[in-house]
Amino acid sequence: MNILIDLERALHQCDIRQNRAEVESLIHASFKEVGASGRSYNFNTIIKMMGAEQSSNGYIHSQDFESILLESSVYLLLYKSAWVDNNGIKSNFAKRSSIWVFTGENWQLKYHQGTPCQEFELRIR
């Protein structure tokens, strides 16, 4: 489902992450996350964390998306990601899972988890 991939990738962008209105439209009020560190986040903590982030010299690369329909308005989105700095150095490889729900108005992220994984070859889109 391309719209969910686009929304997931939007949440990787610093300008989106620091725009509270954008983040609130993309993240469900009952959002939960288990980060790669094992720490848990909710809607309020993730909004605060994203708002405090500084611009960085690099980007999040994501690939190998797979969507699984759980219910008529609920999808599980699986993919892999890595951090790529401005020098092309890759790090923070992870397998990710997100649950997206359609609220009747728009898609919102309700759950996210990142699990560190072995390095993989990046396929540039």
Image: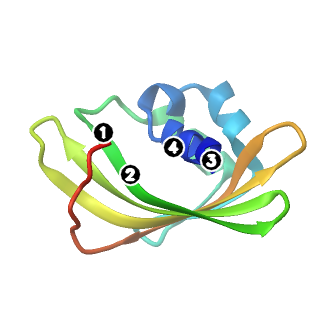
Label whose residue precedes the other's in the sequence (1 or 3) = 3
The residue type indicated by label 2 comes to Ser
At mark 4, the secondary structure is helix
What's the distance in space between the residues labelled 1 and 2, CA to CA? 10 Å
Viewer-side residue, 13 vs 107: 107
Label 4 and label 2: CA atoms lie apart by 21 Å
Q: Residue at x 20, y 62 (%)?
A: 121
Residue with the most extreme right position: 104
Residue type (three-letter) at the residue carrying disc 1: Tyr
Give the SS element for disc 3. Answer: helix
Q: Residue at x 31, y 74 (%)?
A: 117
Secondary element at image label 2: strand
Quadrant of the rendered image containing residue 75: bottom right
Q: Residue tagged by mark 2?
A: 62
First along the sequence among labels 1 and 4: 4
> Residue 36, relative to residue 15: is it above or below?
below
* Amino acid type for the residue under numbered disc 3: Leu
Dot label at residue 49:
4
The answer to whether 17 is drawn above or below residue 68 in the figure is: above
User: Which residue is painted at 45% across and 41% down in the image?
Assistant: 12
Q: Nearer the viewer, mark 4 or mark 2?
A: 2
Image quadrant in which you'd find residue 7: top right
Residue labelled with disc 1? 59
Badge 4 vs badge 2, beta-carbon distance below 8 Å: no
The correct choice, above or below, for 16 with respect to 78 in the image is above
Query: Which residue is identified by label 3?
Result: 4
Disc 1: CA contacts within 10 A as few (<14), some (14-19) or many (>=20): some
